[in-house]
Amino acid sequence: MEKDIFPKGWKVYLPLIVIFVIMLFFFPNVGKFKYHYQIGRPWAYETLISPIDFPILKTERELMDEREERYSSVIPYFRYDEKISKEVGERLSKAIDTLSADADLVLSLFDDVYDYGVVSSLSAQEIENGMVFVHKDRRAAEVPVENIFDIAHAGEYIRKQLAAGMGEERADSLYAAMGLSDYLVPNLIFDQATTDMIHKEAAGYISPTKGIIYTGQLIVSKGEIVTSEIAQLLDSYRAEYLSDMGIAGNTILIAVGNGLLLLLSLLAFFAAILFVDRTIFGDSRKYFFLLTLYVISTLIIELLGAVGNTSYMHLIPFPLFALYMLAFFKRNYVFPLYTVLLLPLLVVTAEGTELFFINLLAGIVAIISYSRFNRGWLQFVNAFFIFMTLSLSYTAFVFLQNEDLGQYRDYRDIFYLGLASLFCVAGYPLIFLFERVFMLVSNSRLLELADTNNKLLRLMAEKAPGTFQHVLQVMNISDACARAIGANVQLVRTGALYHDIGKTVNPQCFVENAAPGVNYHEGLTPEESARDIIKHVDDGVALAKKSKIPQIIIDFILSHHGTTKTEYFYNMYLRGGGDPSQAGLFQYHGFKPKTKEQVILMFADTVEAASRSLKDYSQQSVTELVDRVIGMKMDDGQLEDAEISLKEVSVLKSVLVEYLMQINHARIAYPKRPQK
């Protein structure tokens, strides 16, 4: 029977509708700039004449240089102290009262000096800047440095003016006799707090523009090579378009266009899930987990896209989303899902192509490298590979878009990419939260469960050593089978280790644990023997639940025998005249395998146990055994619920035959040492 192309059920499509409606509210309702250009390439469109007036934006380098210049130049702020000027004038008037002939000249010179202002000294930086702020008469104004005095220059000025009025010899005598230098006290008081505040404000505000393009002015001609200057004009035009025309345009058409893009992105993600594994739709936990990742990533893209600063996009650890998916899905599932997850980048941001490409490459590297570097400090090695991929691909785009390497954009972006790489390590523990919320089992959790030092597995090794050796062999066989058909290797390995855990309750019931010469079933009826053997499934489920083993592993316990019977004791029962209608007494309490991994375990468990009775391990005898055992399972309908093809079953048969022959090859008999 052919499967439907699309899955059925409201649980599949209702979440998509809800997500679309919610995301539509967050989608930035702005138009898209229709021109695409690159420095060093010809302008591929018609000659562009500006339809509006728009300011020319400064480049990042120009803004940084201007900011550094502002920070390096400090204009000091002084407060004019009128009180000091009056006090000096009064003291000086009393001192020169007896020299009435020269009093007016001296007082006049001091008044001139103090009217300009006197500071204690002028630093080299203040002299170099050439300006100071002076707060006088409730107003602050920039004053040239040459219009104020420091103590030394004030004294020199007064001495020269006295010499001009009364002669140099008499002026020097008067200056020394009166000690006029002692009356020179600064009346411009330096205000450190206000200086710092003004400096901070001046450095903080820098005009982002450097000119204007008027309506009708040429921006770029058709076929003209796009230089860095032309690119800056186009960047400025795009910024004005998106901030004004992109919003003021036909909002209905813009909303419809953005809605369609969002819908197509969501449908693409749906199609990716359908492509990699349609059974995900039947597992609401995995389906909702993937949709949650899509919503989180798209919301972050939309919210940061609304801010308009592309640099912030570099902080998002997109490769982490690939690692989240890798924790719960096979590697070949992750790449197409991750690729579609990044599609909103192409729509929301101006540099979408760049962001999409560098994060796609980083995600691929993360997927590949994580298989080797996924434990402890090795995760930082993985983060290093992610950072190198992000930074190198980002640098490649920078080189493509800048003629002058000195105009390298903002090194802050590289720092952001480094943080994003570290976030891939810091954010990975959220997998354990996802495990709890969505009741999933990650590969990390499976690795922990497969550790033979775990309590249940140690209990099996101690109480049922024969069974423990059996499950180890089944695990290795299952591993080979899973790799051959692309099943989840770690899942089937862990399931194999726990599938017979129930045998630890009554280990002597099973032949692999029985002591030599002891037959547990001697004296028991076939019904009693079957009951005790079947019970290991129920005991295994109880032990697993008590130890909080995940349900996905418990399903291996329930499905490894399916709904088959204990054939040996059932046949004995029938030969003894038993009633066939009581066949249920001999049937295992489980369910038929549903997944490839469960089918693999059923085959590996049955074939490994049956192979122990073989006396001849030739290819023919092993092949006949495998064909007979698997044929019985298929004839009994044990695979009718399983998601596995006949081709994959054929591959499993070949792997089982090859593996059994390898582990049961003939041994060489060692010759005895000759007696002396």
Image: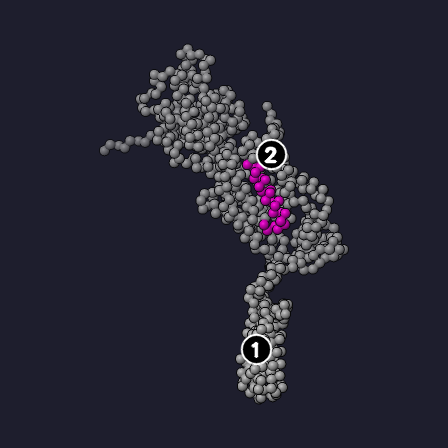
Q: Residues within 10 Å of mark 2 (few under 14, many from 20)?
A: few
Instruction: Give the left or right position of residue 463, taking residue 209 as reference.
Output: left
Residue at 58 percent of width and 84 percent of height: 97
Position of residue 161 relative to residue 387, above or below, is below
Marks 2 and 1, how far apart at CA: 85 Å
Residue at 45 percent of width and 46 percent of height: 377
Depth check, front residue: 608 or 468: 468
Q: Which residues are magenta?
A: 289-312
Q: Is residue 68 visible?
A: no
Looking at the rendered structure, the number of numbered marks drawn on it comes to 2
Q: Is residue 586 visible?
A: yes
Q: Nearer the viewer, mark 2 or mark 1?
A: 1
Q: Position of residue 562 (x, y in %)?
A: 47, 23
In the structure shown, which secondary structural element does the residue marked by tag 1 occupy?
A: helix
Split into 4 quadrants, where in the image is the N terminus? top right
Question: Of callouts 2 and 1, which one flags the residue occurring earlier in the amino acid sequence?
Answer: 2
Residue 15's disc is 2
Residue at 45 percent of width and 24 percent of height: 561
Position of residue 34 relative to residue 581, above or below, is below
Q: Is residue 526 magenta?
A: no
Do residues under tags 2 and 1 come within 8 Å of each other at their CB atoms?
A: no
Residue type at the position of mark 1 = Val
Instruction: Give the left or right position of residue 353, taking residue 320 as reference.
Output: right
Q: Position of residue 123 (x, y in %)?
A: 55, 72
Residue at mark 1: 88
Q: Position of residue 331 (x, y in %)?
A: 53, 38
When asked about the image quadrant of residue 609, the answer is: top left
Residue at 57 percent of width and 76 percent of height: 87
